[in-house]
Image (cartoon, rainbow, N blue to C red):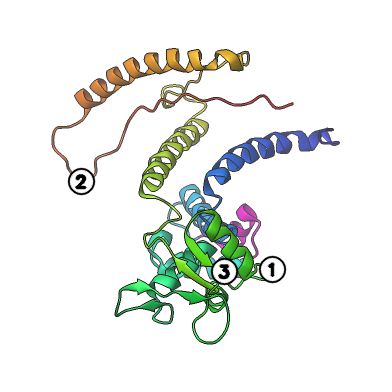
Amino acid sequence: MNGPSQPALLDIAILTRAVENVFRKLIRMLIGKISLKKLQEMIQIIFVEEAEAKLKQEAPGKSVALGDIALQTGVDTRTIKKVRTYIAVNNPIHQDDTFLDGFMPLFKVFDLWMNDARFFDVNTGKPRKLQFEGEGATFSGLVKLAIQSRGLTTQAVLKRLKEIDVVDEDPLSGTIVLKQEDNVFISKDDLDLLDVGFTAIGNLVGTIDHNIRHHLNEEEKYFQRGSWDYQFSPEKIDHVRKVIHRYLSKTDKKSRDIIASLAEVDSQNGQLTAGISMFYFEEEQQT
């Protein structure tokens, strides 16, 4: 594949490739857990918020003009006004019920089935058995209420719910039953792993950001190193994993001891979080 035709675009292409590589891996973890629409909304809010914070740091005490934010974000000033208003009057994104509503299409179907009296029997405390279509509360009606998206059919929703073993369909009676009544789309174990994983990713990005901002001052930079090679045999990779795991386990014990010895004994306001992260990675060679 040919690269950029203009030399001036080469640096932009390098940055684009790096961002794409990171985003692609993040998005793999997010598919099925957050809709593209909500991810776009979240990025827009955060981008404007962080751009304004950056401009305030550059000129302390001065108000930030809409035009300056527009230059940093590429977003028109009308949209920036709306985002600013949202930030000013709403809770943080993760506490905003309006934002969280419809976070993922299947979440909304599940939420209505478990909470709306039309689809949930308050007397039995159970989700109702629904006819696929017809009069009254039906599965088709549930999907139409939950998902306002063109091109997404009730059959497609039912097919996916059956694939992940959330519902049972009785073809003879034409009824559909919700089999699982817990939040089935992200298990507790998955949620814990995602929380830990994204915290680690955030810490790494924070270190990289700090080091970029202090690249001219070696004493200010945080320790950041990586060791890798491109010549590992797939047939021998199990052995490689075991050897490196033993090494990192020993190093991890030493790291925990050092962190514990340096931390204050008592918890107080204004303290910082500091730590050491280690991880092993593999990546297939791109042809």
| CB under 8 Å between discs 1 and 3 | no
Can residue 237 be seen by looking at this rendering?
A: yes
Tell whether label 2 touches label 1 (CB within 8 Å). Answer: no
Q: Nearer the viewer, mark 1 or mark 2?
A: 1
Q: CA distance from mark 1 to mark 2?
A: 52 Å
Which residue does the image show at 65% across and 67% down from the upper left?
152
For label 2, count other residues whose C-alpha is less than 10 Å away and answer few (under 14), some (14-19) or many (20+): few
Find residue 269 and name its label.
Answer: 2
Give the overall secondary structure of the magenta segment.
Answer: helix
Query: Three-letter amino acid code at disc 2?
Result: Asn
Over which residues does the magenta segment extend? 64-76
Q: Quadrant of the N terminus?
A: top right
Rendering quarter of residue 133: bottom right
Instruction: Measure how far apart labels 2 and 3 are at the Cα level.
Output: 61 Å
- Count residues near mark 1 (Cα–Cα under 10 Å), then give few for <14, some for 14-19, many for 20+: few
Residue 266 point in image, percent of width and height = 13, 37
